[in-house]
Amino acid sequence: MKSPIFVVSVLILGCLVYARPGFAAVVDAPLRADHARVAEVSIWQSNFQERERFQTFDASRLSGGNLASGDIDGDGKPEIIIGSGIGVSPLVRVYDTNGKLIKSFLAYAQSFHGGVRVAVADLDGDGKAEIITAPGPGMEPLIRKFHGDGTFEIPNGSLAYAKNFQGGVHIVAADLDGDGKAEIITTPGPGGGPHVRIFNGQFENQNKDFFAFANDMRDGIMPAVLRTPEGPVIAIAIESWSEPIVKIFQRQGNGYVPKNEFLAFDRNWRSGVSIAAVDLNADGFDEIAAHGNGGSTAELRFLDRSGAVLGKYLVQDPNYRGGLSVAQIDADGDGRMEIATVANAPVVSGPLYEEKSVYVNISQQRLYAYEHGRLVNTFLVSTGISKYPTPVVTTTVQNKTPVKRYTWNYGPGNPDNYDLPNVQWNMNIYGYIYIHGTYWHHNFGHPMSHGCVNLRTSDADWIYHWADIGTPVRTFYHPPAQNEQPEGTTLARQ
Ligand SMILES: [Ca+2]
Ligand SMILES: [Ca+2]
Ligand SMILES: [Ca+2]
Ligand SMILES: [Ca+2]
């Protein structure tokens, strides 16, 4: 089903920032409407004057998706492979270039809603591409391999990084050594080190791993493999909250060494950068498609391998501030690459410029802690019962007290009176309202308090030592109650 030709104006647009969790399962996090779109795939001609579009996942969900392309059935025509975005079941779907669904299967347990990243390449040299999947944030870094019909090749998959790393994994596959069998390249999302790993099709590490940046960097990195006249090179971009550096690594001896690096966007850009290989001029070698990961307009920018800008295009509506997933595909068989794009929502975008901030979603009974808009921790809380509701406030941490006694006397014999000594990790946020540890109940996830935000003592310990006096705190209902709208924006539930 081809959709009508759509003409888009070519625009040059500006910047800003991004978000993705460092760890923790965050399937129910608040997602701003401007950071999310449906998983509609666009296939653009390389001049961006025409496109075809088709829907993939549930059109009622603003899940976005993750794209790759390859010939999974060996008929010489490429297919489009899309992994689901956040907030929905971890599906992989295979479409032909006209948007006809060929295959749909689950890559991970149905309950995992952190998104599925996909790579497609012929791992075993049989002429049919396999599909390799990696999870988004919220589960162990398990990569899996599927035939085009959705059957597992290695049933248990393999851990690309330490089992306890849950920041999500990025994945790409290409034949790095010219033996006709593709290798798998993985990189960690935020919270992981800049560790590029290289596996063969059997998930055996090839002893060619390298660190793309300083070992203590934790901003997440994203990979692409570019075909060049000197052979394939690995390009690495920083996923979030750092300068928009793209670094190119080439094979040397038995490993990889830096070849060159450049800024894909202005130096003050803090949206992070995703990259994909695109052969723009049909010479058989790849240029770089680059875009932000959330907080900026959907500018898709093309650069050559030295970083010179070749073109800039707006590929979503002007209000969109999420990420993109991009794949090249010769959809019409003329030997020139078309460019497939789909929205790729950041898992969460919180306040972008604040170094740290705390959201308490009263409706969800959940607290979210952000650094530069990137979720770093989240846990269940108990806010005030209906008789003593937690106020909706935009405030800051006023003061911190390690141990505190809470007492209140509503009148003689009043059953609501309380006297709770030795409460640990107390942060005053507003009036008599505190965020604090709780030892007298374990009913987190349900309102229990007289207005304070009750946390497990271990969670209170964490946030007490993480937050500073002056750290912004917002309490709100989601969806907003009556006329209350946090940050003046409409929140869209995932
Ligand atoms: Ca095919
Ligand atoms: Ca194969
Ligand atoms: Ca190979
Ligand atoms: Ca073409």
Image: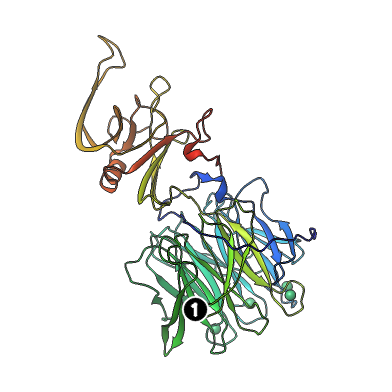
Task: Please state the horizontal and vertical placement of residue 176, each as a whole percent of the image.
Answer: 53, 83
426 to the left or right of 43: left
Task: Please state the horizontal and vertical placement of residue 93, each as a whole percent of the image.
Answer: 66, 60
Residue 76's image quarter?
Answer: bottom right
Q: Quadrant of the N terminus?
A: bottom right
- Residue 286 higher or lower than 155, as above or below: below
Residue 4's image quarter?
Answer: bottom right
The residue nearer to you, when weighing 410 against 428, is 428
Identified by mark 1, the residue type is: Ile
- Residue 24 higher or lower than 392, as above or below: below
Task: Please state the horizontal and vertical placement of residue 86, each as a whole percent of the image.
Answer: 55, 52
Q: Quadrant of the C terminus?
A: top right
320 to the left or right of 430: right
17 to the left or right of 3: left
Task: Please state the horizontal and vertical placement of residue 453, each as a whole percent of the image.
Answer: 34, 33
Q: Residue at x 61, y 83 (%)?
A: 285
- Residue 378 higher or lower than 15, as above or below: above
Assign ligand 4 to one image quadrant.
Answer: bottom right
Q: Residue at x 70, y 65 (%)?
A: 43
Does residue 426 appear anywhere in the picture? no
Q: Residues within 10 Å of mark 1 (few under 14, many from 20)?
A: many
- Residue 28 higher or lower than 208, as above or below: above
> Which color mode does the image show?
rainbow
Mark 1 C-beta to ligand 3 under 8 Å? no
Q: Secondary structure at mark 1?
A: strand
Q: Which residue is mark 1?
A: 234
The residue nearer to you, when weighing 50 against 3, is 50
